[in-house]
Amino acid sequence: MQRVLGLVDNLLDLVLRLTDLLLGFTSATINLAFGDRRGEHEHTSFTFLGYTFRPRSAIRKDGSLFTSFLPAMSNEAIKAKSDELRAMRIHHRTTWSLNDLAAWLNPKVAGWMYY
């Protein structure tokens, strides 16, 4: 176990040096996330480009469930979409027909669904 932790530390040092050179990241902005569910870890998820990666349930081809490290929209991104929807003030568009509302909202909502 100590050998594995030593290798992880060496790898983390290498990643920190490379990212500092290439992207300007510091050790304060990089956290190691453990995706396994076998034990308590400080970091079990991370957010990257609006997606939160964390252990989630997934379905195998045979239909059984297992835990996998999968992405989904981050809480910050969900809040931003919620704020954007609230700013559209749909409840004030009482004179519009349902078809008009659908034509106005569908392209935006379809883009969010592909997120």
Image: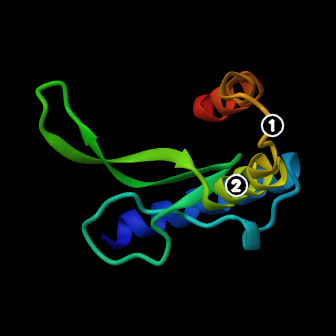
Counting residues from the N terminus, which is met first, the one under dot 1 or under dot 2? 2
> In front here: 61 or 26?
61
Picture coordinates of residue 111, whole percent (x, y): 68, 28
> In front here: 94 or 73?
94
Q: Rate crowding at label 2 as few (under 14), some (14 to 19) or many (20 or more) other CA atoms within 10 Å.
A: few
Q: Rate crowding at label 1 as few (under 14), some (14 to 19) or many (20 or more) other CA atoms within 10 Å.
A: few
Q: Which residue is mark 1?
A: 95
Quadrant containing the N terminus in the rendered view: bottom left
Picture coordinates of residue 112, whole percent (x, y): 65, 35
Q: How many marks?
A: 2
Identify the secondary structure beneath mark 2: helix
Res 26 quadrant in image: bottom right
Q: What amino acid is labelled 2 in the image? A: Ser
- Residue drawn at (28%, 64%), measured in percent from left and top? 37
Numbered badge on residue 17: none
Picture coordinates of residue 18, whole percent (x, y): 77, 50
Res 11 quadrant in image: bottom right
Picture coordinates of residue 8, whole percent (x, y): 49, 62
- Residue drawn at (36%, 73%), measured in percent from left and top? 2
Q: Residue furthest front?
A: 95
In this picture, residue 49 sits left or right of residue 88: left
Q: CA distance from mark 1 to mark 2?
A: 23 Å
> In front here: 88 or 72?
88
Identify the secondary structure beneath mark 1: loop
Q: What amino acid is labelled 1 in the image? A: Thr
- Residue drawn at (74%, 67%), measured in percent from left and top? 29
In this picture, residue 37 sits left or right of residue 75: left
Res 39 quadrant in image: bottom left
Numbered badge on residue 82: 2
Compared with 53, 101 (above or below) is above
